[in-house]
Amino acid sequence: MVARRFDYFVILAEMRTGSNLLEATLSQVPVIHCHGEAFNPDYVGGPKVKALMGMTMADRLRDPGALLDRIRAAEGFNGFRFFFDHEPRVVDAILNDPRCAKIVLTRNPVDCYVSLKIAYNTKRWRLTDVKDKIAWKPPFKPEEFEAFLHDRQQFQIRIQNALQVTGQTAFYLDYEDSLRVDVVNGLLDHLGLSERIERIADTIIRQNPEEMANKVRNFPEMEAALQRIDWANLSRTPNFEPRRGPGVPRFVAAAGAPLLYMPLQPAPDAALRDWLARLGSGGLVEDFRQKTLRAWMRRNPGHRSFAVVRHPLARANDIFAAVLDRDGFADVRRVLRDHHGVGLPADDEIAGMDATAYRAGFLGFLAFLKVNLNGQTTLRQDVLWASQGAIIQGFGNFASPDLLCREDRLATDLGYLARTVGAEPGTPPGAVAGMAPVPLEAIHGNDLEAAARDAYPRDYVTFGFGRWKPQR
């Protein structure tokens, strides 16, 4: 008999994330036994359950560890759901146990909050027949939502830190993922089980499928409140290079044609912006927020979006120039000098660097980028020097670009884009003008090529870059 990878499992979730449905789906597998909210502060397992594993609520309150031991040792493969406000005395025992499989189930927190408000006020916690639905619109309360969000964020951070410290990994899935048979079967494989399901449980019906605007009383106030919240780390999961946001405020649209430009920093793109501004009736649309950009998209059916991908070495040269020039990177320059062996003069002497000194500093900076993007330095992994792949992946959190233009064929790609939206392309820019004070062709060499490839290996492979060549 093959030894099982885990002794038991826990679904780390929250109310209204779909944990009941996931539990019902997993329970289709004969060997799996789900015990509900075994450590809920108000009951043991469920509101109508008097005893679980031979223990009453009073027994569990006296010794919660005993119930955990019984679940672990019970016949079959046993598990339960655990929320942020459940029995605090067993949290560390669960999270630190590598023999406990962790399933982290999440859902858009706004959806969770609104769904919870509806459930509290209608007393409908589960829906098994749509005719039993009770319609009710709750008010959105900003302060209440922020407190709701904070508690759940802190619990997610605690889960992640425990997994990192103990060298474990969890199976992460969102509510929408739990509705997919193939994802749940992947979860079963992660749990070390050979059984498979054929369908998602149909005993529970989604209660509130309406659009958010139709689910709350004060949708405009909700939108305004959500704009004030910093969502930067809301869905963060472990990764060498941090996940990036979409960067919508940097996007630029042509006022005279449905074309949207998604810049990758640093962006020496004055000629490209001039070209966009000359299309159609002329002008640019800037300073987007996600709400205003969605409105622009709705007003411009058939719109196309694009980004310009550059050779990593040429882009790195402009990144280095920006680090040398910008006041906001004084702390970075100091750390590069003091701790990473990058030969940079004092800030007031940088403007006088000759090509030889610049080249030596650039080579050292590329070596720094390699270790920084691998998470091996104390300096921030700034979006300025993030890999192009990571930035484009961040775009996808809002909308992926329709076309990735190449700097070595920029005029062709931009002309094609203009024609797809019925605009006369005119004369698109034929190249990206570098912003570095020392052009790459003046310092190019094999050592710089190798260092750039070490710093951005995935960009080279993903986008098919070879050795850098001057643009003609």
Image (cartoon, rainbow, N blue to C red):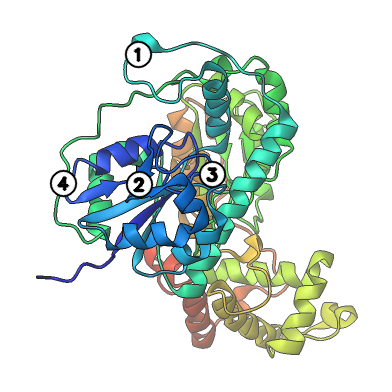
Q: Residue at x 75, y 34 (%)?
A: 143
Q: Is residue 205 above or below residue 135?
A: below
Query: Which mark is in front, 1 or 3?
Result: 3
Query: Where, by quadrant of the figure, is residue 285 drawn?
Result: top right
Q: State the separation of the CA atoms marked 3 and 4.
A: 29 Å
Amino acid type, residue under disc 4 in the picture: Pro
Q: Is residue 426 left or right of residue 364?
A: left
Front: mark 4 or 1: 4
- Residue at image position (14%, 56%) is 194
Query: Looking at numbered disc 3 in the image, what kind of residue is underneath it?
Result: Pro
**158 or 429, nearer to the observer:** 158
| Camera-side residue of 75 and 262 | 75
Residue labelled with disc 1 = 130
Give the distance between the C-alpha atoms of the residues marked 1 and 2, in whole angstroms. Answer: 31 Å
SS at circle 1: helix
At x 52% / y 37%, what residue is drawn? 108
Q: Residue 365, percent across and down?
A: 64, 80
Residue, disc 2: 52
